[in-house]
Amino acid sequence: MKTKGILIVVSGFSGAGKGTLMKALLKKYGEQYALSVSATTRSPREGEIPGREYFFISTEEFEKKIAKDELIEYAKYVDNYYGTPRDYVEQQLDAGKDVILEIEIQGALKVKKKFPDTLLLFVTPPTAPELKARLIGRGTESLDVVESRLRRACEEAEGMDKYDYLVVNDDLDTCVEQMHAIIQGEHLRCSRNTVFISEIKKQLEELKGE
Amino acid sequence: MKTKGILIVVSGFSGAGKGTLMKALLKKYGEQYALSVSATTRSPREGEIPGREYFFISTEEFEKKIAKDELIEYAKYVDNYYGTPRDYVEQQLDAGKDVILEIEIQGALKVKKKFPDTLLLFVTPPTAPELKARLIGRGTESLDVVESRLRRACEEAEGMDKYDYLVVNDDLDTCVEQMHAIIQGEHLRCSRNTVFISEIKKQLEELKGE
């Protein structure tokens, strides 16, 4: 029973460990997943490689993509556009790969509306104090930034129950296995296997008539 | 994140290998699952042990259970009652175990209606000819019986898309892992973790206020 790839949107609080989780998942089960790379109009930062962190394109190119409906979702932050190119995602899905987009909650809900088969996963630390401890523990953020992240987390938490699944990032290995299990399981949903179901019904009818 | 056990109903065509699959699942992950044992008014057959295959009770006792709503579902075949005692199931769920009922499709849909959180799994062979081959291969059934099983499978197939998940029983080990992955994944559904979600929202609000 071979199904088409599933489009997976991963969101979660800043500090929940999404990046680390994605890396570990791809390291272990890389042959099954493809990570979508966003396009942006902002300039590359030091160490960023075009096509790895982002596709860096001009505002003109980006707006052309919007006009041609070549983006699955996009948003503008400050003066820069960020969006998910449709062609790469569709190629990978057709090839049977599950494609992961890491985007924030507003984008996630837009994608789900446009593509109702999308699987929405929310990554969260086990508790809010643990989230705060991780944000402080990074040591790279000022207390102001930590607090603004926590306020943002409060807002984001309001949308948590619109997601399909919750991934509690406590132990990384457990978390990778859980995320993989969720996606494996989803492939077996009856609603994703209507072709198989029609086929076996047809075969049974034929056998009965013999 | 500890969730209550999930009630799981497993159905499938006769010959799909449900029995073998359940045994293999319990052998590998026995600490997580509990198999529900049905009550029946029919007499024990040779080799059947009370409390293992069935609880054997009198018609009077059975009808008392119906009257007291002590059965999750029940049905009458020919002159005998078959049903699922509620107390055992609820004890196991409360203890965090996932409880598996192996019942046919009409019963499965009744359970789902009464307990909407129930997970419905349908076990199927990869193809209908494979099902026929397995039924013939058993060698214990006359051709008449094989054909009546296939006719029954045709009827049952009509209800397949009312199930949540499909488990294609091709290779037994794969099948055990798939079934386990489905159930593991289900525990992480947002709709099954509303307590966790409310709790983390509350914690975030408190931290923000500090």
Image (cartoon, coloured by chain):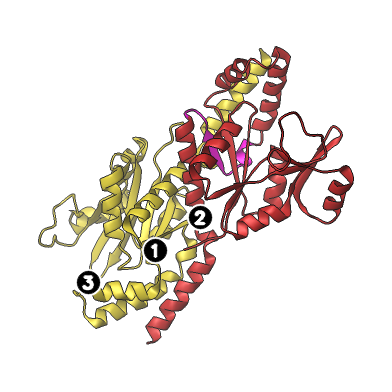
Chain colours: A red, B yellow
- Judged from the image, the secondary structure of the residue bearing numbered disc 1 is helix
Residue beneath disc 1: B105
Give residue A55's quadrant in the image: top right
Residue beneath disc 2: A187
Rounded to the nearest whole Å, what is the CA distance between mark 2 and mark 3?
31 Å
User: Toward the viewer: B162 or B13?
Assistant: B13
Say whether residue B85 is visible: yes
Position of residue B29 in the picture relative to residue B187 (left or right)? left
Please report, as a chain letter, where disc 1 is located.
B
Rounded to the nearest whole Å, what is the CA distance between mark 2 and mark 1?
22 Å
Circle 1: residue type = Ile
The region drawn magenta spans A160-171
Dot 2: few (<14), some (14–19), or many (≥20) neighbours within 10 Å?
many
Nearer-N-terminus badge (1/3): 1
Question: Across the whole image, how many numbered discs are drawn on residues?
Answer: 3
Circle 3: residue type = Arg
User: Toward the viewer: B124 or A54?
Assistant: A54
Residue beneath disc 3: B138
- Judged from the image, the secondary structure of the residue bearing numbered disc 2 is helix
